[in-house]
Image (spheres, helix red, strand yellow):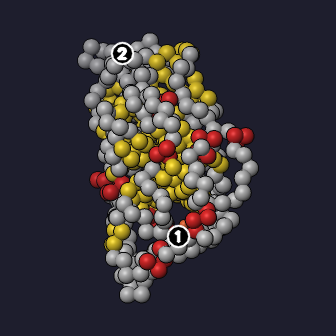
């Protein structure tokens, strides 16, 4: 939810007649959130949007279960997602959940073909971070092209499909059952992004609306209550002639995030980019470092007693950590103090800049690890801080 958009043809007033030149009456679909209290978008379909009938659901990914997480000692963990067995297939099948709780599911995807059906996630908003590759998100609201180092947001319930391009793909995803939004402190009272926010309205890539689309596809998979359900349409689901509202997909290049730098080290909250229930998503991007002559730019050891911290490493040399590479996922759980690797604290004194690039999450609740995640664990990680 960035701001209101309008594309194609809509009537002057919601819930009033919208006919084509030949007299054909179009049909509204109100896509609402939080019941009817939250943000919404109104779409105008050529055909009735609610005529899909149940069919088999031949697609979907494995839903993580807490019973798969074995009790383990509390420890700092490092998972090498680069070493995951690449599942391939369309994005709808390729998702491999790694860390999860009731608020977020963090997954890796290495898709190598387009979604052959439409998908609507009825459980959650999806936020992808594209490490490698790119492609197009196609929906009734338009196409959103995306590429390396882009975040890609797909709102809950939106019928869409993902069409990766021919390049190797490596995506990190965050499924957010509580919804995803921009942190409220970045808005003014009119809802506009403040002048001191770390991004502006112009930084978001919006859907390019191309009118009604018939790709010949009629099948839809809906995820709801942690299960996948199939439906079949008698017509093209993307038969939209216009829409307006604030619920739509977008892309945000992580390098458009404007970082802050202080006299001394600033806490991760200044990197806050997106918020969800029980988690803050932060962007660490290349930037100059602290400018006090005695500053220690490396993060101080800390006991953030209410948060698990997860970092997905996307590039550059991460100031505080050794032994991690592009595609690494570190998990520092609440309950134990964490901080830089040996030598990093002292070594950072006098440093003037960092080229690190990473996505970080602080989560309120403990994260569980799936079997796939544990299969790529770097077993020596906790001891590497000694
Ligand atoms: Fe930390």
Picture coordinates of residue 121 (x, y %)? 52, 33
- Left or right relative to 136: residue 172: right
- Viewport quadrant of the C terminus: bottom right
Which image quarter has ligand 1?
Answer: bottom right
Q: Residue at x 47, y 35 (%)?
A: 86
The reply to whether residue 32 is visible in this rendering is: no
Q: Does the residue labelled 2 lie within 8 Å of ligand 1?
A: no
The CA distance from mark 1 to mark 2 is 54 Å
In terms of sequence position, does the residue under pointer 1 or pointer 2 come before the other? Answer: 2
| Residue at the far top in the pictured view | 234
Element assignment for label 2: loop
Give the vertical position of 142 relative to 196 (above or below): above
Q: Which residue is drawn at 58% across and 26% down?
A: 228
Q: 38 and 281: which one is in front?
A: 281
Picture coordinates of residue 379 (x, y %)? 61, 54
Give residue 18's mark. Answer: none
Dot 1: within a 10 Å radius of its alpha carbon, few (fewer than 14), some, or many (20 or more) residues? some
Q: Name the residue under label 1.
A: 341
Q: Name the residue under label 2.
A: 216
């Amino acid at each position: 939810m960035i701001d209101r958009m309008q594309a194609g043809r809509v009537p002057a007033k919601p819930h009033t007649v919208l006919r084509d030149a030949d007299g054909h009456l179009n049909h509204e679909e109100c896509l609402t959130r939080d019941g009817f209290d939250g943000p919404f978008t109104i779409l105008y379909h050529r055909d009735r949007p609610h005529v899909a009938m149940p069919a088999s659901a031949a697609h979907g990914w494995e839903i993580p279960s807490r019973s798969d997480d074995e009790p383990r000692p509390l420890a700092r963990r490092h998972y090498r997602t680069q070493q995951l067995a690449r599942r391939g297939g369309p994005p709808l099948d390729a998702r491999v959940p790694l860390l999860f709780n009731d608020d977020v599911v963090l997954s890796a995807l290495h898709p190598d073909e387009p979604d052959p059906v439409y998908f609507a996630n009825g459980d959650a908003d999806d936020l992808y971070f594209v490490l490698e590759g790119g492609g197009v998100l196609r929906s009734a609201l338009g196409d959103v092209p995306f590429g390396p180092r882009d975040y890609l947001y797909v709102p809950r319930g939106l019928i869409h499909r993902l069409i990766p391009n021919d390049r190797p793909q490596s995506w990190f995803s965050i499924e957010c059952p509580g919804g995803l939004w921009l942190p409220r402190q970045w808005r003014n009272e009119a809802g506009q992004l403040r002048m001191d926010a770390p991004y502006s309205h112009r930084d978001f890539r919006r859907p390019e609306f191309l009118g009604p689309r018939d790709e010949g596809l009629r099948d839809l998979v809906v995820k709801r209550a942690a299960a996948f359900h199939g439906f079949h349409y008698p017509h093209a689901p993307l038969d939209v002639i216009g829409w307006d509202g604030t619920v739509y997909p977008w892309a945000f290049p992580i390098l458009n995030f404007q970082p802050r730098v202080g006299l001394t080290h600033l806490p991760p909250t200044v990197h806050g980019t997106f918020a969800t229930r029980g988690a803050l998503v932060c962007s660490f991007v290349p930037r100059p470092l602290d400018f006090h002559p005695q500053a220690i730019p490396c993060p101080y050891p800390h006991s953030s007693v209410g948060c698990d911290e997860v970092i997905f490493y996307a590039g550059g040399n991460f100031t505080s950590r050794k032994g991690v590479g592009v595609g690494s996922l570190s998990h520092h759980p609440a309950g134990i103090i964490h901080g830089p690797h040996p030598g990093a604290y002292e070594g950072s004194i006098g440093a003037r800049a960092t080229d690190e690039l990473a996505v970080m999450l602080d989560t309120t609740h403990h994260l569980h690890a799936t079997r796939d995640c544990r299969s790529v664990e770097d077993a020596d990680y906790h001891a590497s801080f000694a």
